[in-house]
Amino acid sequence: MVLLGVAAWPLTGQPPAGDGADTAGSQEEALLAAGLRNPALALSDPGRYLKPSFGKRVLEAVIREAPDDAVAVAAGDTPSGATIREALSASQSPEFRFFL
């Protein structure tokens, strides 16, 4: 897996170019690492995290890592806030019901 560009992946919406050996699992790990490294940034534009098929799992992990930031974003009247509220409502995780 090519790590160069992983931090920019959430900003560009595109996975980093690799040697063809990237798998969905390694892409998920890379996106998760970027989100956990800076959860506030990830939560500021959650729509980019939801684009890949595994994005919901990654976004939920970021929300668990930074629940205060998630609630602050969700409370806002912004597209990001609406996306976080939708993710919390749609989640099967019972702890997310507390945030709503």
Image (tube, rainbow, N blue to C red):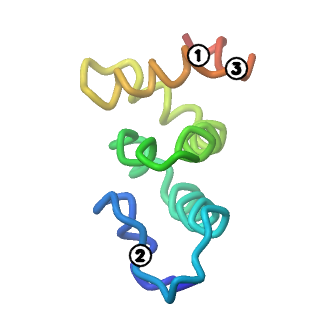
The amino acid on which the numbered mark 1 sits, given as a three-letter code, is: Phe
Is 75 on the left or on the right of 19, as rendered? left
Q: Nearer the viewer, residue 19 or 6?
A: 19
Tell me if mark 2 has few (under 14), some (14-19) or many (20+) residues whose alpha carbon lies within 10 angstroms of its own: some
Residue at the image position 50 percent from the left and 50 percent from the top: 39
Reading the image, the residue beneath label 3 is 92
Quadrant in the picture for residue 84: top left
Q: Is residue 65 left or right of residue 2?
A: right
Residue 63 in the image: state x and y as whole percent. Answer: 58, 37
Q: Is residue 39 above or below residue 27?
A: above
The residue lying at 34 percent from left, 21 percent from top is 82
For the residues labelled 1 and 3, the Cα–Cα distance comes to 13 Å
Badge 1 crowding class, 10 Å Cα cut-off, few under 14, some 14 to 19, many 20 or more, is: some
Sequence order check: which comes first, mark 3 or mark 2? Answer: 2
Classify mark 2: helix, strand or loop: loop
* Pointer 2 or 1: first along the chain: 2
| Residue 81 at x, y percent in the picture | 35, 25
Considering the image in quadrants, where does the N terminus appear?
bottom right
Mark 1 or mark 3, whichever is nearer to me: 3
| Residue identified by numbered label 2 | 16
